[in-house]
Image: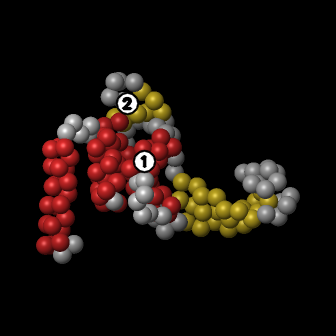
Amino acid sequence: MYCPVCHSKETKVVDSRMTQDGFSVRRRRECETCSYRFSTVEHVELLDTIVVKRDGEREAYSRSKLEKGILQSLVKRPYTQEMFDKLLGAIERDIQKKKKREITSKDIGDIVMKQLKKFDTVAYIRFASIYRSFEDVDTFKHEIATLTENGKRRKRRGN
């Protein structure tokens, strides 16, 4: 790990702590050259996972591509970086639970939709409008009505 200040490769770990969700490790580091202290976060990486796209093309799973797609749906929505990291972690855990070397982009989209629905309903609708390729306003209205009805049911049950 290079020091962000002097770019020295000589850094040491001073402290390690697991994050609240238990799926990342936060490390406090110190540069042995300039004594600057900084933090890093390690998370599980989905290695060797291949995404099969709708046209049959295959590409390596990319966390940054997933982040970019989700961030577009979260524009001007209230969330913290920690909340966003937990969302990504939940999505990647669901992908890992499939225990497959290859996963379709449709499966990933469904997982994102499931997690976004719990995270932020506006972001969910934004993501769904692109992912499901809403063709008209009626389809959009139907999805909102479904969300509204599910919300009413949860309130009646006391959730």
Near-viewer residue (138 or 31): 138
Circle 1 Cα neighbour tier, 10 Å, few/some/many (<14 / 14–19 / ≥20)? few
Residue 56: quarter of image: top left
Q: Quadrant of residue 43?
A: bottom right
Residue lying farthest to the bottom in this orientation: 158
Q: Nearer the viewer, residue 140 or 156?
A: 140
Amino acid residing under circle 2? Val
- Neighbor class of circle 2 (other Cα within 10 Å; few <14, some 14-19, many 20+) is some
Tag shown at residue 120: none
Q: Residue at x 42, y 27 (%)?
A: 58
Q: Is disc 1 placed on a helix, strand or loop?
A: helix
Amino acid at the residue labelled 1: Gln
Residue 113 in view here: no
With 35 as the anchor, is 21 left or right in this view? left
The spot of residue 44 in percent (x, y) is 51, 51
Q: Residue at x 28, y 46 (%)?
A: 128
SS assignment at label 2:
strand
Q: Position of residue 114 (x, y in %)?
A: 29, 52
Marks 1 and 2 sit apart, C-alpha to C-alpha, by: 22 Å
| Mark earlier in primary sequence (1, 2) | 2
60 lies left or right of 56: right
Q: Is residue 53 above or below residue 125?
A: above
Residue 75: where, in percent of width, then height? 43, 53
Q: Position of residue 149 (x, y in %)?
A: 14, 61
Quadrant for the C terminus, please: bottom left
Q: Determine which residue is flagged by label 2.
A: 52
Q: Residue furthest front?
A: 137
Q: Is residue 140 above or below residue 26?
A: above
Q: Judge left or right: residue 20 versus residue 110.
A: right
Residue drawn at x 47%, y 47% as measured from the top left: 67
Q: Pointer 1: what residue?
A: 72
